[in-house]
Amino acid sequence: MRSGILFTVVLVVVFLLIVGLPAYFVSRWMSKRMTKTEMRMGYRNALICGAGLLGLAALGSLVISHLFGRSFRDSLSLSLNVLWGTCLIGWVVAWQRGYAAAGPVLLDCGPHPTRGLFRFNAALGVVLGLASIVNSRGAAGSQIFSGAIFWLTMGAFFLALSLDRLQLRHNGVWQYGGLLRWEKIESFHWKEQSTLVVKTTHTSWMPWIREGALSVPPHLKEEFDRIWRQHVQPYPSV
């Protein structure tokens, strides 16, 4: 009994040191580069997306386990990889289509304020991908795919995010890798001086996420707002 309690306490302490402590410093680092509104909405949307994706992965693993008689662990690994591959391909297609339809740049607001974190995640993905290749010597090809390919593509994804920018385009807002068309914007209002809270119209793709926040450089806010109001009609009342 005592050994079980001690093991649990040690496990919690190790978890806090490995996950909690870095998360605390990352949160403090991000708070200096993002407003409270942007962080709150970003965390909320990420939590909703993460919960939804994990739910789909768990459901997929149950189906794979039932149909092919594989262990839940192997089924979950395969389900996560299929889900990640599908999402990545969908993102690349959406990026290409959005970029082609965005039109000329009206105002460039620069890269994402936390691009340093994206670069760190990209480097971490490369390191973990190479480590998976080294550790998978002699293993089955599926194990190499589920490890190395997953982490390397994850690193490439974060690298792409770190290089992208916030721009007002002729046909919409280019928001770090995706196009939000002007006609998809339902309402907006400013918070915390230079944070724009945007509510989009109802869509079939993740309809439960309709609000987001954009951090605009303070020295570009006036020009940003002028161009924005030329395209978003009617002017919403706050």
Image (cartoon, rainbow, N blue to C red):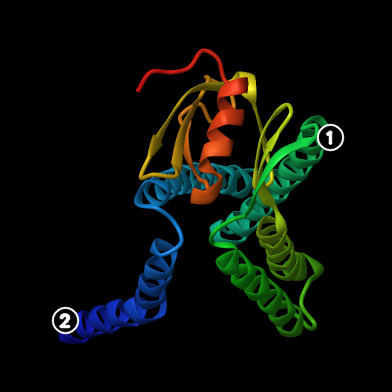
Above or below: residue 181 compared with residue 140: above
Residue 142 location, quadrant: bottom right
Residue topped by disc 2: 1
Identify the residue at the far left of this view.
2
Residue 137 location, quadrant: bottom right
Residue 76 visible (yes or no): yes
Identified by mark 1, the residue type is Ala
Residue 68 visible (yes or no): no
Identify the residue at the far right of this view.
100
Q: Quadrant of the N terminus?
A: bottom left
Q: Quadrant of the C terminus?
A: top left
Residue topped by disc 1: 100
Nearest to N terminus: mark 1 or mark 2: 2
Quick one: 192 or 154, which is closer to the camera? 192
Where disc 2 sits, the SS reads loop
Q: Name the residue rendered at 54%, 62% in the picture.
A: 114
Above or below: residue 168 compared with residue 78: above
Q: Callout 2 environment at 10 Å: few (<14), some (14 to 19), or many (20+)?
A: few
Q: Callout 1 environment at 10 Å: few (<14), some (14 to 19), or many (20+)?
A: few
Q: Name the residue rendered at 15%, 85% in the picture.
A: 2
Identified by mark 2, the residue type is Met
Q: Is residue 176 left or right of residue 188?
A: right
Return the x and y of residue 51 as percentages of the image width and height: 45, 46
Above or below: residue 152 compared with residue 99: below
Alpha carbon distance from label 1 to label 2: 63 Å
Return the x and y of residue 181 as percentages of the image width and height: 66, 26
Return the x and y of residue 210 as percentages of the image width and height: 48, 29
Q: Is residue 77 left or right of residue 91?
A: left
- From the image, state whether disc 1 or disc 2 is nearer to you: 1
Q: How many marks?
A: 2
Where disc 1 sits, the SS reads helix
Q: Name the residue rendered at 53%, 20% in the picture.
A: 201
